[in-house]
Amino acid sequence: MRQIDLKALAKINLGLDVLGKRADGYHDVKMVMQSIYLYDNIRIEESNFPGIQLSSNLSYLPTDQRNIAYKAAEMLVKEFEIKEGVKIHLKKRIPVAAGLAGGSSNAAAVLFGMNILFKLGLSKLELMERGLKLGADVPYCIMRGTALAEGIGEKLTPLPSLPRCVVLVAKPGFSVSTKAVYEALGTLKDLNHPDIDGIISGLEKGSIEEVVNAMGNVLEAVTIPKHPKINDIKKLMIENGALGAMMSGSGPTVFGVFKYKATASITKEQIIKKKLAKQVYVTTTQHTSM
């Protein structure tokens, strides 16, 4: 039987600003997104058994319609009346519910892989349009690289690549609700909005220092007071030589930008030793498309 193997990449937010709540309940955002080389392995196979079979190396992960990767497969099976069965296995490395778009990236890989496997003939733009029906981050996870995301995250503009650097990713041993974070944001005043234009200017100049100096995430104002460990991780990264450190998405994952892998690796060991996080990865930025 035919099969395809793909890597579903995680993302970090170099900048995340929330401009306001919309009438439909979503929020208008302005974000700079960046793919990193931390990934889940996705295997998609044709099957003799009709329907969708989803499996994972994580026992607690749902393998039915509650899983966005399953929903992605189901969408294409229904639209194109695919008669063959499809078998999907997710080998998860990206921390779950971590602000790294792991689920959205899995859905993006399923859409991309099934398009090839079943010869559906969809363009990247057509895949991104379908991805938006699944979640606001899915179109970006199909596009990848460095991009400005506006609207609810679906209006994407490619940006010059972040100069290659080392990224240290640390996910504390708890999760946060994205919905709850956005709801709480509406109750806060005098928010410190990040300099998204400054990040873009730094990217255009190829200056990693300028990008890092402009980095910011408005959602930290909600998540950090409830989970001070996030700030502890940020401080440790900075003290150990990170050019900058920030929470990704709604959290709780923190990433640090380093010039040298050795420095990032030493910091990783300190984070683990101090029991600030168990899931800690040293990786790099990634610019290739799926």
Image: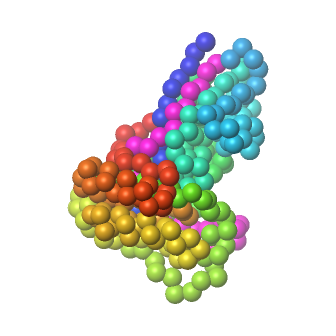
Q: As drawn, which residue projects farthest toward the front?
A: 273
Drawn side of residue 180 relative to residue 289, left or right: right
Q: Is residue 96 visible?
A: yes
Q: Is residue 110 above or below residue 31?
A: above
Find the magenta span and give its range: 18-46
Q: Position of residue 126 (x, y in %)?
A: 57, 40
Drawn side of residue 83 relative to residue 186, left or right: right
Disc tally is 0
The magenta stretch spans residue 35: yes
Q: Position of residue 225 (x, y in %)?
A: 55, 77
Observer-nearest of 32 and 133: 32
Quadrant in which the N terminus is drawn: top right
Q: Position of residue 159 (x, y in %)?
A: 36, 55
Observer-nearest of 129 and 77: 77
**Residue at the image point whose x is 31% and y is 68% from the top:** 239
Observer-nearest of 194 and 176: 176
Q: Is residue 149 visible?
A: no
**Residue at the image point whose x is 56% and y is 27% from the top:** 43
Q: Is residue 96 above or below residue 221?
A: above
**Residue at the image point whose x is 59% and y is 49% from the top:** 96
Q: Is residue 139 above or below residue 56?
A: below
Dominant secondary structure (helix, strand or loop) of the stretch shown in magenta: strand
Determine which quarter of the picture holds residue 273.
Answer: bottom left
Q: Position of residue 77 (x, y in %)?
A: 71, 29
